[in-house]
């Protein structure tokens, strides 16, 4: 497997604070790597160090097998970046914004025209070419920001929380677009604090907390770390304490909580947990509205590893 990026022992300090703490990672060619972590965990700082936009305290960064540095323009031209903060020109319309950013890399006019059309179609802005940024909704503006960052068809693409505060339609469009970029051969580094997105699009995930990698692997591999087989939720009104105690004693049951008429049971392992529970409820004539089983989420993994929730 070829690596597009190799980072060794990266540390970035702000006075006392280690924003990035001895971080080593590889990004494989052609994958979508997710950097998942709560706000302040060091995602943006990591990206800005990789891009040589920030000086760092310690560590080495190789991109496409070459040492990265602020003047490494041969590497930089292979990279596309979509920053966390939208950065487009207010005085240029959608088409001209993309044209400007693409034009920094693609000088041939005919090629560039095609690339701009490709970028417009990637993010679904074909019908907004003449719109100015001010006239776009938050979601459409994000999509323009992405088009500007990737129009030159770079080999490596960084997207820093591109779906924060966008409507669901734009969010889906953005996630689809990222998968298309990968299909077209790009290597993608994607940061987010939304674990659901990581589960949908990422081939591999690195979980960050306080500047450190606390776990990495595929979503399935990470879920094993939570040491939970499944979580069963039952919507049941006024469940008596004695039943809760009995359920706690059932086979494979790990934890039981009962809040707001929701009974939540986690199981360490075992099969047919849901059926066994339903039989029990029937036997005791306990009526319930809903009952369902779920696999652990990445939030459960985060909770297990750090003792706190990933959600903000
Ligand atoms: N310029 C700065 N000066 C001091 N501290 C900073 C600066 N930029 C970021 N930080 C701190 O570094 C940590 C990581 O920030 P950041 O990389 O932006 O996190 P994330 O992108 O995961 O939300 C945070 O605690 C943040 O407050
Ligand atoms: Mg950030």
Image (spheres, grey):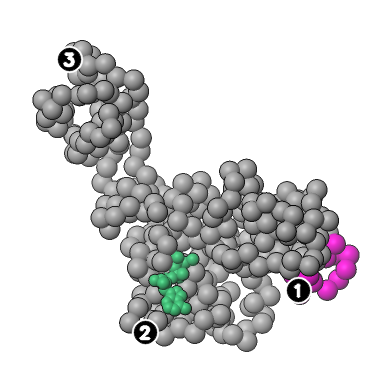
Q: Name the residue under label 2.
A: 15
Is residue 112 located in the magenta-colored stretch of the structure? yes
Which of the two marks, 2 or 3, is nearer to us in this view? 2
What element does badge 2 sit on?
loop
Beta carbon at label 2 within 8 Å of ligand 1: yes
Distance (Cα) linking label 3 and label 1:
70 Å
Distance (Cα) linking label 1 and label 2:
37 Å
Magenta segment boundaries in residue numbering = 100-113
As drawn, is 222 to the left or to the right of 125?
left
As drawn, is 19 to the left or to the right of 90?
left
Q: Residue at x 35, y 27 (%)?
A: 292
Q: Mark 3 points at which residue?
A: 284
What element does badge 3 sit on?
loop
Is residue 34 located in the magenta-colored stretch of the structure? no
Q: In this view, does 234 lie above or below 135?
A: above
Beta carbon at label 1 within 8 Å of ligand 2: no
Q: Mark 1 points at which residue?
A: 105
Which of the two marks, 3 or 1, is nearer to us in this view? 3
As drawn, is 176 to the left or to the right of 134?
left
Q: In this view, does 138 lie above or below 297?
A: below
Which image quadrant is residue 40 in?
bottom left
Residue 17 location (% of width, % of height): 35, 78
């Amino acid at each position: 497997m070829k690596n597009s990026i190799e980072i060794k022992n990266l540390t970035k300090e702000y006075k006392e604070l280690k924003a990035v703490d001895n971080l080593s990672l590889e990004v494989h060619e052609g994958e979508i790597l997710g950097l998942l972590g709560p706000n302040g965990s060091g995602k943006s700082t990591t990206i800005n160090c990789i891009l040589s936009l920030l000086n760092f305290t310690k560590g080495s960064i190789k991109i496409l097998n070459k040492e990265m540095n602020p003047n490494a323009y041969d590497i930089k031209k292979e990279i596309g970046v979509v920053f966390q903060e939208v950065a487009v020109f207010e005085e240029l319309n959608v088409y001209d914004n993309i044209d400007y950013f693409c034009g920094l890399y693609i000088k041939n006019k005919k090629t560039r025209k095609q690339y701009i059309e490709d970028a417009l179609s990637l993010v679904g802005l074909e019908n907004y070419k003449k719109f100015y940024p001010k006239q776009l909704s938050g979601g459409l503006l994000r999509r323009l920001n992405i088009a500007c960052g990737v129009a030159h068809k770079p080999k490596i693409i960084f997207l820093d929380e591109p779906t924060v505060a966008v409507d669901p339609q734009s969010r889906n469009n953005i996630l689809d677009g990222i998968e298309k970029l990968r299909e077209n051969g790009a290597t993608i580094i994607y940061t987010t604090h939304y674990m659901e997105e990581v589960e949908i699009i990422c081939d591999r995930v690195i979980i960050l907390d306080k500047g450190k990698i606390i776990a990495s692997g595929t979503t399935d591999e990470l879920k094993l770390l939570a040491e939970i087989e499944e979580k069963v939720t039952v919507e049941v009104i006024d469940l008596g304490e004695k039943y809760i105690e009995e359920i706690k004693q059932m086979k494979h049951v790990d934890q039981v909580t009962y809040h707001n008429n929701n009974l939540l049971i986690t199981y360490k392992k075992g099969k047919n947990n849901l059926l066994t529970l339903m039989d029990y409820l029937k036997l005791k004539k306990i009526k319930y509205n809903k009952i369902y089983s779920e696999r652990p989420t990445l939030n459960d993994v985060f909770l297990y590893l750090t003792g706190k929730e990933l959600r903000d």
